[in-house]
Amino acid sequence: MEITWWGHATCTVEDSGVRLLTDPVFARRLAHLRRRRGAPPPARAAVADAVLVSHLHADHLHLPSLARLAAGTKLLVPRGAVRAVPGLRRLARLDVVEVGPGDTEKVGPVTVRVVPALHDGRRMPVGPRRSPALGFVVDGRARTYFAGDTGLFDTMAEEAGPVDVALLPVGGWGPGLGRHHLDATRAAEALRRLAPASAVPVHYGTYWPIGLDAVRPHEFHSPGDEFVRKAAVSAPGVRVHLLDHGESVRPEVRR
């Protein structure tokens, strides 16, 4: 079982011979955001048996990145995504499956279970149509929880269930975070509640708004290290793997 972090919320989860890719964003620039750390992922990052898209925001559902996937790749998107994001219809060569909390999908020997997240699931800034923001639990040799983009909510641990590895967002792409996000402090509390064997912090230290390099730069640079410090206090039994862009780890698995 292996996790590779490509930057932002983009990870490859390899389990039982299956490759799953989360929220793929391969661009150097995305609207007003510029990739400030880590090279864009190499071509092999787009190779996956299935792709898990947590919500419709363009830094998570990025159409040009999805267009790089091979024909036949299974693409799990929030229910209502095809109506809200018409560009998905142009990706007809992909196996697009709309899912919601409580759904499960088989990918070879691995089961993907869809769980809720606390986040605005709309495609912004256009249109009022809502789709649920999602998390995913990948159940293979390990149980891996990809939280997507989410705030801390009371039933998070109950919804995820027992997990071996947690991929948790710990920052963002700008100088402020609302309550529907996890910062390092809230992510450490989530880790305490989830109690996995291992964790990998994601969704930080990759993209930053153009022209705001000098505005609260610590919000770009420090969330990963801050999460490690806070997790050591909140969840001392969890091993946190702080990865560089493109780095992989084989995390601890209890079973």
Image (cartoon, rainbow, N blue to C red):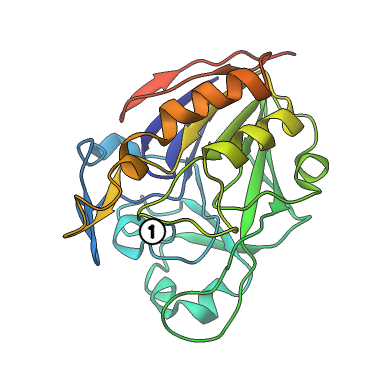
| Residue 132 relative to residue 9: left or right | right
The location of residue 196, given as percent across then percent down, is 69, 24
Q: Say which residue appears at 48% left-offset and 74% top-offset.
A: 123
Between residues 232 and 157, which one lies in front from this camera angle? 232
Question: Residue at label 1?
Answer: 59
The location of residue 176, given as percent across then percent down, is 42, 56
Q: Say which residue appears at 79% left-offset and 46% top-offset.
A: 159
Q: Quarter of the image containing the N terminus?
A: top right
Is the residue marked by circle 1 packed among few (<14), some (14-19), or many (20+) residues within 10 Å?
many
Which amino acid, mark 1? Asp
- Location of residue 15 (image quadrant): top right
Q: Quarter of the image containing the C terminus?
A: top right
Question: Is residue 46 in view from this perspective?
Answer: no
The location of residue 171, given as percent across then percent down, is 45, 44
Reply above or below: 178 against 146.
below
- Location of residue 63 (image quadrant): bottom left
Reply above or below: 130 against 63.
below
Question: Could you say whether the residue bearing mark 1 is in a helix, strand or loop?
Answer: loop
The location of residue 139, given as percent across then percent down, is 70, 33
Between residues 79 and 28, which one lies in front from this camera angle? 28
Q: Say which residue appears at 43% left-offset and 84% top-offset.
A: 126
